[in-house]
Image (cartoon, helix red, strand yellow):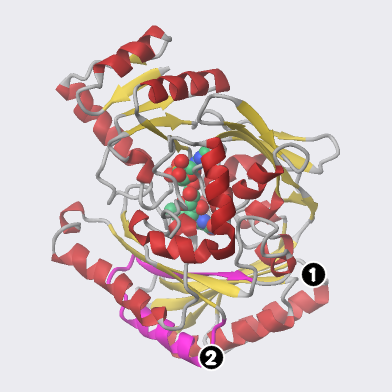
C-alpha cells in the first residue's frame, strides 16, 4: 500500500502505517505538488480544491482494517473514494485519511443469474460489463460513477420506474465497520444496517462488496430526441402526461443542453420495457412532435444504451456547481420556470437534467428502506459547468454559479422540502434532515451503534444532531 501525504505528514500516524506495511511517500515539496495535481484530477469536480491528509490504496479488507485501526488510534477521520463523483468532494477534507477502493472493482454474477456481487470500488461500467446481456439491475446514467456511492445515497436511473432505485436492488453488503469488524448486512443478519445502507447515506462503514438483485430484461426501446426551446413547454407537459399513462413501463430522462448547433434545446430520452407496440406508439408520438430532431431510436440491450462517447459530455476535472430541487410534477408553472432557466443558461457546458421517479418504487413502503420519499417526483439537477480555471473565482465562474442558484431559487417554492442527499453539499444539512424525516431517528441510532466515535464524519447524507 502506498500513502500519498499532501501536507507535512502527521508523523506518528505515518510511522505507524509504515510499521504495518503501509509505505508513506516522503513529503518532499516537488513530489507533494505532483501528487496534488494527480489527486485533484482523480475527483470529478475540478472546483474542489481541498486535499486530504493522505490517500491509501486498499485492495482488500485486511488493508482497510489496518488503516481504520491506526486512524482510530491517532484520532484521524476516514473517508472512502471510489468513483470520485461526489460533487462536493467531501472525502478530500484535509483531516481525512482516504481509502482508495479503485482496485476493489471485481464483479461476480451468480450461476442462476439472479444476483450480481460487486467490489466496493466497482463503477457502473464494471457492473454493466459483467452482466449477461439479458439481465439488468438499477444503475445510474453515467458509466464512471461508483455503484456503491450511488446506492448508499439512493441511485436514480433510467430503469428506476420499473425496477426501483439502486438502493432498492441491494440485497446484502459486506461492510468493515469503524472498529474493524466485518459484518454482512442482509435481511437475515443485521437487517437494521441493510435498511440504513439502502439510501441512508455513506457514514456506516466501508462496503467491500454489495450484492444486487438481477431482473430479466433482454431489450429496452430507447430514444434520444431534441426539440427547440419554442416547443419545450408543451413537450414537458406531454412528458408528464406520458408518465401518468405508463408509470411502470416508461422512464423519461429529460432536460436541457446545448446542441452541436450552439442552440440550447430540450432533450427527451424515453426508455420503455413494457409491451412492444405500446412503447413504439409512445416513441412514435414523441418523434412526430413539431421540431423533433431524432438522434437515435431502437430496441437494444439495456447496457447498449450507454456509450463512452456520450460520457464525454461530463469530463472529469471540469468546474461544476450543481444545486438540485425535487418537484412532484411538471405542471405549467414548473415547465415555465425550467424553460426560462434554459433560456438563461450561461455556459455551453451547462445543463438541466430531470430524473423521474414513479411506478414500482412508489409502491415500496416509506419505512421499508432508509430512503423515505416514495411519492412520484422529479429530481432537477441544475448543472453549471465551465472549463476555464481562471474563471473559477472570477466574474465568469460567479456568473455560471449565479445562473444555477437563481434557477434553484426560482424552483424552491414549488419543490418538496429536502433533496437528494447524494447531490446535497455539506452546508445543506437541514435539507438532509427534512429529506430523511421519519427515517432520521433510526439512522442516527444505527450510526451510533456502528460508528460511535464518528470515524466517517465527512459522509454523504450526514444528519445534523437531533433537536
Ligand atoms: C457525472 C455524474 C453523474 C451522476 N449520475 C447519477 C445518476 O444517474 N443517478 C444518481 O442517483 N446519482 C448520480 N450521480 C451522483 C452520484 O451517485 C454520487 O455522487 C455518488 O456518491 C458517487 O459515488 P462515487 O463512488 O463515484 O464517488 P466518491 O466521491 O468516490 O464517493 C462518494 C461517497 O460515497 C462513499 N463511498 C463510495 N464507495 C464506498 C464504499 N465502498 N463504502 C463506503 N462508502 C463509499 C464515499 O465515502 C463518499 O462519501 C452523478 C454524479 C455525477 C458527478
Q: CA gap, disc 2 to disc 1?
A: 25 Å
Q: Residue 81: within the magenta?
A: no
| Total labels drawn | 2
Q: Quadrant of the C terminus?
A: bottom left
Q: Which residue is mark 1?
A: 274
Q: Residue at x 72, y 75 (%)?
A: 247
SS under mark 2: helix
Residue 448 rendering spot, x and y as whole percentages? 52, 41
Which is more N-terminal, label 1 or label 2? 2
Reading the image, the residue beneath label 2 is 234
**Which region shows up in magenta?**
329-357
Rendering quarter of residue 210? top right
Residue drawn at the location 44% of the way across and 22% of the way down:
67
Q: Quadrant of residue 77?
A: top left
Q: Secondary structure at mark 1?
A: loop
How busy is the neighbourhood of tag 1: few (under 14 within 10 Å), some, or many (20 plus)? some
Amino acid at each position: 500500500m502506498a500513502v500519498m501525504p499532501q501536507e507535512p505528514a502527521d508523523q506518528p500516524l505515518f510511522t505507524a502505517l509504515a510499521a504495518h506495511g503501509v509505505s508513506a511517500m516522503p513529503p518532499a515539496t516537488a513530489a507533494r505538488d505532483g501528487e496534488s495535481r494527480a489527486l485533484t484530477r482523480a475527483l470529478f469536480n475540478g472546483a474542489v480544491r481541498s486535499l486530504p491528509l493522505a490517500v491509501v490504496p486498499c485492495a482488500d479488507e485486511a488493508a482497510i482494517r489496518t488503516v481504520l485501526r491506526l486512524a482510530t488510534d491517532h484520532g484521524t477521520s476516514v473517508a472512502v473514494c471510489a468513483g470520485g463523483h461526489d460533487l462536493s468532494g467531501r472525502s478530500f477534507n484535509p483531516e481525512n485519511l482516504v481509502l482508495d477502493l479503485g482496485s476493489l472493482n471485481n464483479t461476480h454474477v451468480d450461476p442462476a443469474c439472479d444476483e450480481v456481487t460487486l467490489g466496493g470500488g466497482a463503477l457502473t461500467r464494471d457492473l454493466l460489463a459483467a452482466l449477461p446481456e439479458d439481465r439488468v439491475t438499477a444503475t445510474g446514467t453515467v458509466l464512471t460513477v461508483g455503484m456503491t456511492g450511488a446506492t448508499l445515497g439512493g441511485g436514480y436511473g433510467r430503469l428506476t420506474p420499473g425496477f426501483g432505485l439502486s438502493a432498492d436492488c441491494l440485497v446484502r453488503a459486506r461492510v468493515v465497520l469503524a472498529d474493524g469488524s466485518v459484518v454482512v448486512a442482509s435481511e437475515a443478519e443485521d437487517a437494521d444496517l441493510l435498511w440504513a445502507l439502502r439510501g441512508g447515506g455513506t457514514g456506516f462503514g466501508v462496503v467491500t462488496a454489495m450484492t444486487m438483485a438481477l431482473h430479466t430484461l433482454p431489450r429496452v426501446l430507447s430514444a434520444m430526441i431534441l426539440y427547440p426551446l419554442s416547443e419545450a413547454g408543451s413537450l414537458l407537459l406531454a412528458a408528464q402526461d406520458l408518465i401518468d399513462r405508463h408509470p411502470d413501463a416508461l422512464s423519461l430522462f429529460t432536460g436541457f443542453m446545448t446542441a452541436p448547433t450552439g442552440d440550447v434545446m430540450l432533450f427527451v430520452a424515453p426508455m420503455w420495457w413494457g409491451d412492444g407496440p405500446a412503447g413504439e406508439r409512445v416513441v412514435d408520438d414523441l418523434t412526430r412532435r413539431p421540431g423533433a430532431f431524432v438522434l437515435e431510436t431502437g430496441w437494444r440491450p439495456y447496457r447498449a444504451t450507454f456509450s463512452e462517447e456520450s460520457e464525454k459530455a461530463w469530463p472529469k476535472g471540469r468546474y461544476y456547481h450543481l444545486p438540485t430541487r425535487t418537484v412532484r410534477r411538471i405542471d405549467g408553472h414548473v415547465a415555465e420556470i425550467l424553460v426560462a432557466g434554459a433560456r438563461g443558461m450561461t455556459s455551453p457546458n451547462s445543463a438541466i437534467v430531470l430524473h423521474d421517479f414513479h411506478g414500482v418504487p412508489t409502491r415500496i413502503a416509506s419505512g421499508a428502506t432508509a430512503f423515505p420519499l416514495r411519492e412520484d417526483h422529479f429530481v432537477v439537477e441544475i448543472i453549471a459547468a465551465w472549463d476555464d480555471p481562471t474563471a473559477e473565482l472570477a466574474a465568469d465562474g460567479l456568473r455560471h454559479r449565479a445562473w444555477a442558484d437563481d434557477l434553484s431559487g426560482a424552483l424552491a417554492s414549488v419543490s418538496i422540502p429536502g433533496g437528494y442527499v447524494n447531490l446535497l453539499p455539506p452546508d445543506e444539512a437541514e435539507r438532509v434532515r427534512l429529506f430523511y424525516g421519519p427515517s432520521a431517528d433510526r439512522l442516527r441510532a444505527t450510526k451510533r451503534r456502528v460508528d460511535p466515535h464518528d470515524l466517517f464524519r465527512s459522509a454523504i447524507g450526514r444528519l445534523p444532531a437531533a433537536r
